[in-house]
Image (cartoon, grey):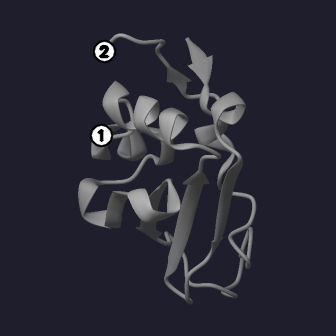
Amino acid sequence: MNTLKNLAKIIRSKNSGPFEITFDVMFDDPATYQRVVRSGVLTHELVCTLYNVPSDDIVALLFFEPALAFKFTLRRGWAQGSIGERDTFGAQQHAPLMNINIPTQPF
């Protein structure tokens, strides 16, 4: 097993408008990207569990091969800039992704 933070070049979250946050996990090389894709670990169910959201709150979730990336967008549980806002830029929401275990091959 290896954690996503050890396999990915970039793991980030960012504001995607006042009602959404988007997440990017990008890899340096096609072999690592394919390893993560084939593992089958990064799923709707995992994102729902990690972020404690219903499936309907996932706006998009996909692997994007041209960028060697896994991407997803979530509806915010609060409007950006609203009272009690925790992270107006959405830049601190990626941490739960970092310690996801990706098994070693074969899958």
| Callout 1 secondary element | helix
Judged left or right of residue 55, residue 61 is right
Quadrant in which the C terminus is drawn = top left
For the residue pair 50 and 42, the one nearer the viewer reads as: 42
Q: Position of residue 96 (x, y in %)?
A: 62, 40
Q: Residues within 10 Å of mark 1 (few under 14, many from 20)?
A: few
> What residue sits 37% from the left and 30% below the top?
41
> What residue sits 34% from the left and 59% below the top?
61
Q: Is residue 13 above or below residue 53?
A: below
**First along the sequence among labels 2 and 1:** 1
| Callout 2 secondary element | loop
Taking the image as drawn, is residue 26 in sight? yes
Q: Position of residue 3 (x, y in %)?
A: 62, 24
Residue that carries the numbered disc 1 in the rendered image: 45
Residue that carries the numbered disc 2 in the rendered image: 107
Q: CA distance from mark 2 to mark 1?
A: 19 Å
* Amino acid carrying mark 2 in the image: Phe
